[in-house]
Image: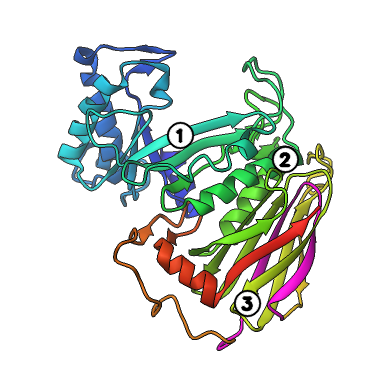
Amino acid sequence: MLEYLELAEDLNATAILCVYSGLTSGISYPPEEMGEFIESALNAIEYTIGDTSTTWGAVRAANGHPDPFPLPYVEIGNEDYFSNTYNERYPLFYDAIMARYPQITIIGADYADSRPMPVRDDHYYVALGGFPQRHHLYDDWPRNGSKVFIGEYATRDGDYSYTGELVSAHLGAAIEDASFMISMERNSDLIIMASYAPLFSNINDLRWTPNGIYYDGLLSYATPAWWVQHLFSTKRGNIYIPAHFDGNTDTFFYSAALNTATQTIVIKVVNNGDAAVNVDADLMGVCSTQGGKVTVLTGGRFDENSIEQPMKISPSETMFTTTTSTFTFNAEAYSLTIFEIQLRENSCTTVSPTDSPTDSTTDSTTDSPTDSGVADYRPSYFQVLVYAMFLFGATFMGVS
């Protein structure tokens, strides 16, 4: 546990503590036998955030880390939808944790209505085609219930019965992951966090595939899926901008966002088709820009990296020299393309995110953690509509 917490600390990542909820291989303990598991959960939390005057905080200090770790979230269980008793077990843990640590946000591992569930953990391991089909899954999801943490997800091209067969971590799977992540950005008022799984695997001890990073005793390499995660987490905005595409939306996915800190428009385009797409883009309301850069991840659909060829599939970055508000680009087959376009000050716009009108009848702006790899928050629909029409809306018009 200490290694996990220190890894998160070193990576500047948010650690989520998942506590055992009394379910093993589909068999759950009865409520009257939950006591020792609840106590174990409370001890783990105390080990993480307790000061050195506490029993388990002192143990952590003796292990070499006297300062408490941050712990904003605790998840009760893991994939508890494999049982029909979660609604009985969940409140026992919820009440005990809230009584001692009311500042912690609880994540549920399945649906339960016996107590509030601030965040619910959804998992998706899908075959090729699974994430494009789920691209609009959360668009009409109720906004008055639990927030969503997509705690495990990956495209698995094979081993659909989970027999242990090795599954290739190829580019095609990663591009389909990206199509789903586009949806996460669009729904970042609801989906507050996401984590690709699993992250690490020793190539000499493969127990689950695919993974994000493979290694042996000396070397390591990142899979195309890891590159997708890296690009989404490092190239993002904090205000989502509606975009439109006149073309085949079954294989072409896109998002646009503004990074207000850098005044940069970030446009992500995923082409999951077997042919390139020629796209005409129009940044409505912007007369000119300072250009920027464009990053592309592409290759053969079933290409993958290896110890021998660790960078076979890796992103390339070039300067984007176009400074007009309209431009044309070619989205390669099986590709992720990311534009980072620097706005020019006073480029035909007078509206800013801080002075644009609001509508009291619409949903309010919702903050979400910046560690999720998606937009930090999503303004109300009326605000976005104003931006789209008058400031820097993005429109895509293209055909294959």
Determine which residue is flagged by label 2. 218
Numbered mark located on residue 222 in the image: none
Question: Dot 3 lies on which element?
Answer: strand
Give the position of the N terminus as an image quadrant: top left
Can residue 160 be seen by looking at this rendering? yes
Residue 355 percent across, percent down from the top left: 39, 80
Q: Is residue 306 magenta?
A: no
Whether label 1 touches label 3, CB < 8 Å: no
Dot 1, crowdedness within 10 Å: few (<14), some or many (≥20)? some
Question: As shown in the figure, which amino acid type bears the numbered disc 1?
Answer: Asp
Find the distance from the CA under tag 1 to the CA under tag 3. 35 Å
Give the Cα distance between marks 2 and 1: 35 Å
Going 70% across and 78% down the picture, which residue do you hit? Answer: 291
At 63% from the left and 42% from the top, the residue drawn is 177
Question: Where, by quadrant of the figure, is residue 36 drawn?
Answer: top left
Graded by Cα atoms within 10 Å as few (under 14), some (14 to 19) or many (20 or more), the crowding at tag 2 reads: few
Q: Disc number at residue 342?
A: 3
Q: Would you name the residue on which mark 1 appears?
A: 122
Instruction: Please say if 321 is above or below 276.
Output: below
Q: Which residues are magenta?
A: 324-346
State the separation of the CA atoms marked 3 and 2: 40 Å
